[in-house]
Amino acid sequence: MKELLSSQGFILLLIFGSYLFGQWVFKKTKIGILHPLVIAIGIIILFLKVSGISYERFETESQPVSFMLGPSVVALGYILYQQIEYLKGNVVPILTSIFVGSLVGIGSVVLIAKFMGADDVLIMSLEPKSVTTPIAMSIAEQSGGIPALTAIIVVFCGILGGIIGPYILKMLGIKSRIAKGLAMGASAHAVGTAKAMEMGVIEGALSGLAIGLMGVMTALLIPFLHHVFS
Amino acid sequence: MKIVKGVFLILLFYFVGECVSYLIRGFIPGSILGMVFLFLSLHFKLVNPDNVSSVANVFTKNMAIFFIPAGAGLMANFGLLSKFWMSIIVICSVSTALVIAVVAIVEQKMEKKKEVEE
């Protein structure tokens, strides 16, 4: 039985099945923290614990799915290409605000983490927290963090940013629709973009652009900062 | 045919990205370099967007599935999570709020400045 349950066919079935179930639960409950990804990961961890199948075995059998992470990051280049037209006429303000945002995002993580006594592995896992999950995981892996931890942190930040974002923007008296969209996408990636789309078409489009720009900017800044400060 | 072309192009850019990443000793991950190269090639019309659009859409719309295996790796790092969950929540909350504020303020200020100059 264990032989069947740890076969590649079943492991792949489990991954797709638990994700579908996660989407269904998320749609029914509409509770932010019950994100499909969180549910799917929860089900799989539970399954591995109960069945006694090791994570190493699961990792080997799930290789076809995890390999797809790299190509799907590459495919984001097409999405960025589609959104780049929103940059027109505002190149300098948009690039500057995302650059400063990326720098503040990384810097604040490192400073607070050092102050709270977190260790380096945790800091590396936290640094790309404002970036869309696949890019964030590649960055964390590169710099010595734990991609799995980064994935959960990114989802958490997305949900959080989606909830607090609109309040912060209101409190600061932000009127510019471009600024609203950029801030949502830069801080809360896809979850923030969903919220930005509720605000309006321009907000949604710029939030989408911000995801890509923030990803590239942070991927370049983190190794650079590590190089300078080490 | 278009699907095959699209998959080929994505894999090609991924491999080129990996090659460059190898040359610069992994300073920047290969997948991210591949993304930048694909973007540039589309932008400078070296690649016809119609050839990658359908595959790119399928890949990116259902991306979350691809991180499930790695996410389950959390299992192996449960100790770290349970030890530092408080720090993680504080850091994420403060830093996320700061990013929202900074991006929105800088963008709005620069837009206004531009309008005044014009």
Image: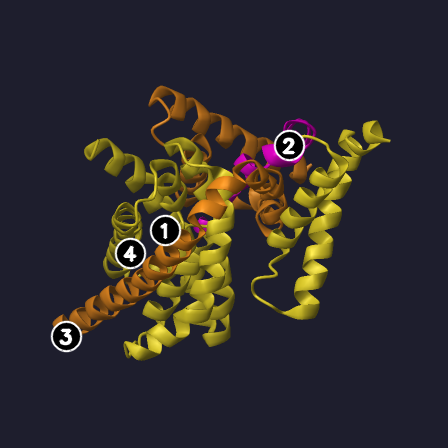
Q: Separation of disc 2 and disc 1 at Cα?
A: 32 Å
| Residue for badge 4 | A101
Provide residue B88's location: percent of width, then percent of height: 41, 52
Residue under the image location 53 percent in, 35 percent down: A70
Q: Which stretch is magenta?
A: A55-81
Kindly report which numbered mark, 2 or 1, lies closer to the viewer in this rendering: 2
Tell me which chain the residue with mark 1 is part of.
A
Q: Main secondary structure of the magenta part?
A: helix
**Circles 1 and 3: CB atoms closer than 8 Å:** no
Label drawn at residue A214? 1
Q: The residue under label 3 is which amino acid type? A: Val
Nearer-the-camera pick, B43 or B56: B56
Q: Position of residue B116 (x, y in %)?
A: 14, 74
Residue A11 circle label: none
In front of the other: label 4 or label 2? 2
User: Disc count in the image?
Assistant: 4
Q: Are marks 2 and 1 in contact (CB under 8 Å)?
A: no
Residue farthest right in this picture: A1
Specify few, some or many for label 1: CA neighbours under 10 Å numbering under 14, 14-19, or 20 or more: many
Disc 1 marks a residue whose amino acid type is Met
Chain on which label 4 sits: A
